[in-house]
């Protein structure tokens, strides 16, 4: 698909057709594009946990949600046949920048203006969201609550130093997708958010 | 351009042709795509500072670099005819999630597993990097050092609560572009960074 069409068509989809799995070649393309995200110092401090079988997906939802009867959101979201959890790895960045060519041997986090480990991993997630659209599928990016992260790590054996920056659900769009009420806020225009030459 | 080609061709370019400005319609397309990035709760807590005239760009480089004779990196980078600084706005997210439908009236940052204000703004930067490639131009994303942020804000009248997550330089690629030595590290493969079903 033309790049500009992919950008225009991308939106968060929160219902999936449970009878249409993600073709394996699409899954692999999502991952191949994800690792083409940029990263500071080419640190590539990221990991991706791919969950596909019903058992794996059930374990994800059990670990990351409240329990009890599923609400409307969870009922639809849990129909997604593929979940990919992008994880950031701060230690890999601190290690990379302690190398001779960078020289930040104190590994001091105050040297970093923003957490590029999270931002770069977010760019990888963005590439997956766009790739899903390019292949005619749908996706959503959503967060894992802070108080569920330990349980998520335990459920899948994820080391402490990897942090899930969210989860990308992927599948063919379902018939019951409900647009986020947040969209009623309206998109802020270019002129509202852009400052030219000075603030 | 086909989406997959844009993804494959994108790389950081660090030298620009000083005699070829960025066409205004490309500049506007960069911005129109940037604001199509997703954002938590449709907060859209971001801003973009566009710097184009020689005076604006000189002020940026003076505020964000060490001073003294420009090194090889700065000599080439400062040839970029267009700089767009994406800024994150945490307060807009805390305000948005204090609204009735979200209910986080305590504005407690511990509710956020990762700084989505930075991640979402990074996704907007990613869309600009890709859009430059789609239009046959080149771009680079680089950071503003923590000890230069106050000076940068002062130079352009940026309010304290907006944080530059970096800067996107844009132009036609220059002849003296030097690939980052970091690339010698090699790209980590899908199999190295992907975990299937469990860690």
Image (spheres, coloured by chain):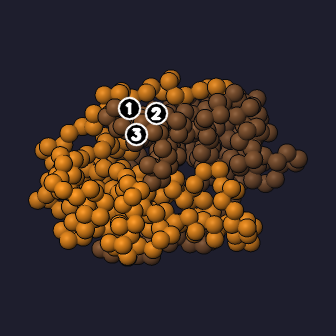
Chain colours: A orange, B brown
Tell me if residue B140 can be seen.
no
Dot placed on the residue nearer the N-terminal end, 3 or 2: 2
Tell me where residue A24 sits by quadrant.
bottom left
Check if mark 2's residue and mark 1's residue have beta carbons within 8 Å: yes
Residue B99's label in the rendered image is 1
Q: Residue furthest top?
A: A191
Disc 3 and disc 2: Cα gap in Å?
Answer: 9 Å
Q: Give the position of the C terminus of chain B as an image quadrant.
A: bottom left
- From the viewer's perspective, is residue A77 above or below residue A158? above
Depth check: give the residue in front, A177 or A64: A64
Residue A148's label in the rendered image is none
Q: Please rate how many residues cluster around mark 3, counting C-alpha atoms within 10 Å: few if below 14, some from 14 to 19, many from 20.
A: some
Chain letter of the residue carrying label 2: B
Chain letter of the residue carrying label 3: B
Residue pointed to by mark 3: B104
Q: Position of residue B24 (x, y in %)?
A: 55, 28
Q: Is residue B89 left or right of residue A31?
A: right
**SS for tag 3?**
loop
- From the viewer's perspective, is residue A93 above or below residue A133? below
Chain letter of the residue carrying label 1: B
Tell me where residue B87 sits by quadrant.
top right
């Amino acid at each position: 698909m033309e790049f500009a069409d992919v950008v225009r068509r991308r939106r968060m989809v929160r219902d999936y057709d449970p009878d249409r799995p993600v073709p394996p070649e699409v899954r692999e393309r999502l991952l191949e594009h994800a690792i083409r995200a940029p990263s500071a110092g080419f640190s590539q401090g990221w990991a991706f946990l791919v969950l596909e079988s019903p058992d794996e997906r059930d374990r994800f939802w059990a670990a990351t949600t409240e329990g009890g009867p599923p609400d409307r959101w969870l009922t639809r979201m849990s129909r997604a046949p593929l979940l990919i959890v992008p994880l950031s790895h701060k230690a890999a960045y601190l290690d990379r920048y302690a190398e001779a060519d960078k020289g930040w041997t104190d590994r001091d986090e105050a040297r970093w203006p923003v957490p590029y480990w999270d931002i770069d991993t977010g760019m990888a997630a963005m590439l997956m969201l766009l790739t899903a659209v390019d292949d005619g599928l749908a996706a959503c990016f959503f967060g894992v609550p802070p108080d569920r992260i330990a349980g998520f790590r335990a459920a899948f054996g994820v080391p402490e130093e990897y942090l899930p920056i969210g989860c990308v659900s992927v599948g063919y769009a379902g018939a019951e997708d409900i647009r986020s009420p947040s969209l009623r806020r309206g998109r802020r225009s270019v002129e509202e958010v852009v400052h030219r030459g000075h603030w």
